[in-house]
Image (cartoon, helix red, strand yellow):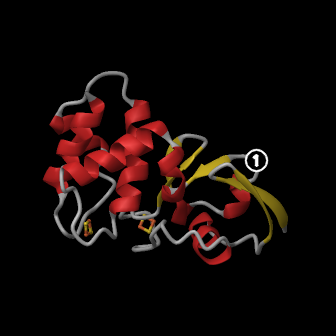
């Protein structure tokens, strides 16, 4: 199927099998490998991107479902005001170790902060970020970084 996919503000014309996930489309067809594949079944959050500003697991969505929507990946975060602030806070709070979960954590955090209307407590951040796992256990740094941005 032919489709147009807008990723990080750029329109891509694609000819895709309708069974291709958004995750595989980003990584294999557009070479945007910042979005990570881990479980490939919606359990870990490593593949999180923004779809029209809302966080989604890109392994659970077909690319063809995203035609007409705006996809934002970690590669687009440097030109996103909140995305930049989250990235800087992750560095300042040492919120990563191997970094494999980090693109998903950052995209999820940007979506999460847009969902919240008030300053978040550490407990609220942990709850709202529960879908993003970190095998390195960098959770304390991640929560500290997101508390700073939330404030
Ligand atoms: S790779 Fe998508 S949730 Fe784990
Ligand atoms: S920093 Fe290694 S999995 Fe999170």
Percent x, y for residue 45?
39, 60
Name the residue furthest bottom: 28
Percent x, y for residue 129?
30, 47
User: Horizontally, is 47 left or right of 25 in the view?
Assistant: left
Name the residue furthest right: 2
User: Horizontally, is 92 left or right of 76 in the view?
Assistant: left
The quarter of the picture where the N terminus appears is bottom right
User: Can residue 41 be seen here?
Assistant: yes
Residue that mark 1 sits on: 68
User: Can residue 45 be seen here?
Assistant: no
Percent x, y for residue 98?
26, 72
Q: Of residues 38 and 60, which is closer to you in this image? A: 38
Q: Please name the residue shown 53% across and 45% down the image.
A: 79
The part of the image, by quadrant, that contains residue 113 is top left
Q: Quadrant of ligand 1?
A: bottom left
User: Horizontally, is 1 left or right of 148 in the view?
Assistant: right
Q: Please name the residue shown 73% across and 60% down the image.
A: 64
Q: Secondary structure at mark 1?
A: loop
The quarter of the picture where the C terminus appears is top left
Q: Please name the residue shown 26% across and 41% down the image.
A: 146
Percent x, y for residue 4?
80, 57
User: Horizontally, is 64 left or right of 104 in the view?
Assistant: right
């Amino acid at each position: 199927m032919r489709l147009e996919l807008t990723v990080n503000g750029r329109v891509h014309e694609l000819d895709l099998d309708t069974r291709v996930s958004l995750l595989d489309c980003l990584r294999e067809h557009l070479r945007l490998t910042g979005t990570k594949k881990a479980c490939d079944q919606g359990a870990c959050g490593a593949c999180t991107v923004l779809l029209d500003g809302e966080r989604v697991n890109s392994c659970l969505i077909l690319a063809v479902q995203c035609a007409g929507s705006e996809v934002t990946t970690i590669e687009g975060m440097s030109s996103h005001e909140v995305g930049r602030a989250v990235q800087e806070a992750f560095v300042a709070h040492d919120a990563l170790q191997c970094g494999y979960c980090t693109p998903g954590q950052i995209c999820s955090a940007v979506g999460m902060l847009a969902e919240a209307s008030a300053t978040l407590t550490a407990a609220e951040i942990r709850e709202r970020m529960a879908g993003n796992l970190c095998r390195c256990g960098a959770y304390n740094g991640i929560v500290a970084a997101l508390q700073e941005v939330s404030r």
